[in-house]
Image: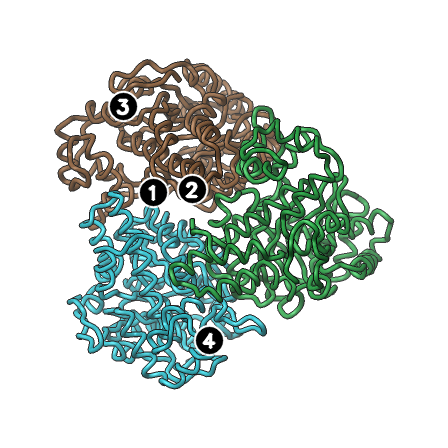
Chain colours: A cyan, B green, C brown
Amino acid sequence: MAAPGPVHEALAALPLVDHHCHGAVTADLSAAEFESLLTEGAAWPGVSPFDSPAGVAVRRHCAPLLDLPRHAPPADYVARRAELGWQEVNRRFLTASGAGVFCVDTGYAPHPLTSPAELAAASGAAACEVVRLERVAESVAARGVEAGGYAAAFRAAAEEAVRRPGVVAVKSVAAYRTGFALDPERPAAAEVARAAGRWLARGGRLDDPVLVRHLLWTAVELGLPLQLHTGFGDADVRLHRADPALLTDWLHRTAGTVPVLLLHCWPYHRQAAYLAAVFEQVYLDVGLALHHTGPARCRAVLEEALEITPFRKLLYSSDAYGVAEFHHLGALCFRQGLADLLQERVDTDELSLADALRIADWTGRDNARRLYGPPVSEPARPSGGRPTRKV
Amino acid sequence: MAAPGPVHEALAALPLVDHHCHGAVTADLSAAEFESLLTEGAAWPGVSPFDSPAGVAVRRHCAPLLDLPRHAPPADYVARRAELGWQEVNRRFLTASGAGVFCVDTGYAPHPLTSPAELAAASGAAACEVVRLERVAESVAARGVEAGGYAAAFRAAAEEAVRRPGVVAVKSVAAYRTGFALDPERPAAAEVARAAGRWLARGGRLDDPVLVRHLLWTAVELGLPLQLHTGFGDADVRLHRADPALLTDWLHRTAGTVPVLLLHCWPYHRQAAYLAAVFEQVYLDVGLALHHTGPARCRAVLEEALEITPFRKLLYSSDAYGVAEFHHLGALCFRQGLADLLQERVDTDELSLADALRIADWTGRDNARRLYGPPVSEPARPSGGRPTRKV
Amino acid sequence: MAAPGPVHEALAALPLVDHHCHGAVTADLSAAEFESLLTEGAAWPGVSPFDSPAGVAVRRHCAPLLDLPRHAPPADYVARRAELGWQEVNRRFLTASGAGVFCVDTGYAPHPLTSPAELAAASGAAACEVVRLERVAESVAARGVEAGGYAAAFRAAAEEAVRRPGVVAVKSVAAYRTGFALDPERPAAAEVARAAGRWLARGGRLDDPVLVRHLLWTAVELGLPLQLHTGFGDADVRLHRADPALLTDWLHRTAGTVPVLLLHCWPYHRQAAYLAAVFEQVYLDVGLALHHTGPARCRAVLEEALEITPFRKLLYSSDAYGVAEFHHLGALCFRQGLADLLQERVDTDELSLADALRIADWTGRDNARRLYGPPVSEPARPSGGRPTRKV
């Protein structure tokens, strides 16, 4: 591990843009509820989610923010969390994250969650919204539509959704629904109508391959950056079909249109780095993996992700969901892992300090600001809990 | 590398459960025979298997146990091995492994090998048996059966095999026979009978996709933990079809039934870790890779495997076959690699010492005892050569 | 990072065999032209190719050879390069590479490039040629041939091409044209004729799956070592179809014929290592990844590649194209990365110094000499700029 140096200081003070996260739960959680939010799996008998890299990291790095000793026992942690109440817990972790901007995916909410504005208000940060297109499509179906009118209705609903103030990007979870081994061509209108007819008759979530392709092509027409879940997630994903390399043919066909942000990527972050190195429109982050692997491994994951990635192509995200611990841990892991790797390169004279500081600013904030534009680039309101630099 | 500390001491003294290994050869080996057992390939002209990471590790870590200097030349090594004789060689390495229990796959024996009882007797450890189901099926075919009776005969033979004393698990080498890109559904009885008819007429090893699926579903009905070869092996495997992520649909369908132990996994250990993180029934080890990558890299492989794996989901195995050097080297690599990574986390205060010691005990012994039950959990007989803690 | 020791000294003095590279541009380059050669992507607005691991490495390690300070600004670098002129730039970097032999793929030349003899002359090294078979096939088509005569004409043209003095190997870019998920069987003559008919009528590059298979089988008949591009490349590749594990069935069918050299391999270098460990005829390198990941990560990539690779199976290549900076950087990264990993193993007594020095000589030079024979094994002419050992 590199001795702390100026890169650590710079990253510690940088108001990050967390370009993809979710809300924090707005309710006090039982021990079981809290534990189930610590894992992409579930809480199984005899296997506490605390007994994982993420659980160890929470006890080490989050307990002190709840006034507990480092490595506090899980029972103490959960009890103290309940004692403080969810508002105070959220405030402490969201403030500690030092994020200047949160870009919030509002399309997944099995729990009661903070809105983007509430997430921001809890920490003095700014908030933006990311529209999940599968949810838009499913709302269109729920409201009732004819098969022949589905494409136009979905397009109209998506356009309306992205016109809401503060929306900076759209997102697709095609990785979960069909995976990326899709026909890369834009489906014909008649094909979409037939597929819509089948789906509307059957109901359920949007997982028809033709309609998922249609959704991705509609995303391109909306003109906003497109975030794509790739790689690691819960048991609903088929990991090998979420390898972003499978998108290559589609990326060729959509070159010159919208930026495509590959989210998470682990364990295919090298594949994602390849795409970012050869396609102008491709960017990546290693969110989710940061807090799940924890401080002991996030540097290693970042080093692999950065092996060939152009430095203007990596972004920061936490992909935190539900527990604000993860908004904090993601930021902590990113700052520490990136600072360790950059500082060591400075210390061994592989990189100049000036370059290291530029790379830190770019990946932690400026690449996102460049991509998402005004709502992300506007100065965050000054935080009560933490001095922030102008962002 | 972490300076040795209390985690190293604890792991050095821990009687490991080697939850998947094979017997050691019960014959003196010529130089060529010994060399061919050092590699998953073969001994090729001009390329000595000693000139590999595993060969270097044998000369470094095994030579001293044969009273030779570290890094002894291959010729000296082979000569001294012959001089001592196979019984003494086996005794030395099996004892040095410090294993409390060996779980032995008895279904692969192209060489004359120790039985589980003989393996255990050589070192004062306990032994259990793992039944390889392909071998059971092939024995049923060899004894003669009608196509329509195959399913019942195989089921009966498997049930009989697992009733033998000391059997704790079944194993499949489906990875070698068809790979995992199989239809995840249980095959219908008529489909099995037709496939059996084709196979019985044709003969040869069991590699029909319907019968391999049927074998996996029969394994589920037997109720014992199921070990699955995944990833790295000899040239008979198609590596990309041995990626355990391909099992996801089958794991969804068999959730709530038997534990599934993904063996070896390298280079898909991150994919295996993902499955262990999101499926209650999934466990993994990085056996085989430990001694083939050697002490210089086993920590790195363990670190990748543990990035997101819950700490109750990793087990130790050597997957040693033939030469008892590998029963020892696997244990040495596991102890050293895991101790280095845990001790460093303790030293940097990412992990408490108490947690590190629990994780060492779990992964080295207790996860296996919890899964396999009594035969594995019974105290090993005290070893003459080495003080053991009660297991 | 290991403290420099005798392994570093030995590797610094070793005249490497760069067993796969391309020529250097024989023209002065504008800033934009130079930048576009720094990346496998392109120069995009707002994203300078200098802002990448390779760009940082060029500024750090190449600038001093142009009499500039380390980490010189891109504009200074490009200006100084133009000032010196391409002949002097090529001479400095090619000499600095310390390569004793360059094996040059002459089949890809969108820019005006040095011939093998010119490349060698610029640095006092020897040069050999690698014949790209797709180019031979496309020349046959361009000259005009009947479908039924294609196979014989291609075979004759390939035989003629490899009879040229200095030719040591053939190469295929099947990875780019179809990927490796091909039928592994040799196509029948009639099938080849039909496919040739379609291709000759259609024109364009050779990407018909039958003809690509035929090309690979023709390569086997030529009797020379066969280099195969695998993994990382430009946007024209489909990365997941360039995984060398997909070649397994074909490698079984061609065992006992020609050596197969898997080039580059990243991010599938572990898969390539598996193939090299179990197939006698398979070798690998991690060219291209060396200079694209740069000195900060090439050790890590080499360590992964060497986890299970027999030490007689790894070769050095730069895969440099166009800018002689990469002939130098590849060599620098290989020397430094390999020396760091071997020296650390010596320092921790995992490897004897004598073994480390043998491994350095093998991988840097002797494995290539053994494979390619006389033209590669002949002593290089003494270099004016650099003392070389007899190779």
Q: Check disc 1 and give the amino acid type.
A: Thr
The reply to whether callout 3 and callout 2 are in contact (CB within 8 Å) is no
Residue A93: x percent and y percent? 32, 74
Instruction: Pick whichever, C298 or C141, lies toward us.
Output: C298
Question: Which disc number belongs to residue A74?
Answer: 4
Which mark sits nearer the N-terminus, 3 or 1?
Answer: 3
Residue at 49 percent across and 41 percent down: it is C307
Find the distance from the CA under tag 4 to the CA under tag 1: 41 Å
Q: Chain of mark 4?
A: A
**Residue marked by disc 3:** C95
Q: Amino acid at mark 2?
A: Trp
Q: Quadrant of the C terminus of chain A?
A: bottom left
> Which mark is in front, 4 or 1?
4
Kindly indicate whether the residues beneath marks 1 and 2 are on one polypeptide chain.
Answer: yes
Q: Is residue B212 above or below residue C390?
A: below
Label 1: element kind: helix
Q: Tags 1 and 2 in contact by the CB under 8 Å rule?
A: yes
**Looking at the picture, which amino acid does disc 4 mark?**
Pro
Q: Which residue is mark 1?
A: C293
Q: Position of residue A10 (x, y in %)?
A: 21, 59
Mark 1, mark 2: which one is toward the viewer? 1
State the residue at coordinates (21%, 27%): C89
Instruction: Tell which tag, 4 or 2, sits nearer the viewer.
Output: 4
Which quadrant of the view contains residue B251?
bottom right
In contact (CB < 8 Å): disc 4 and disc 1:
no
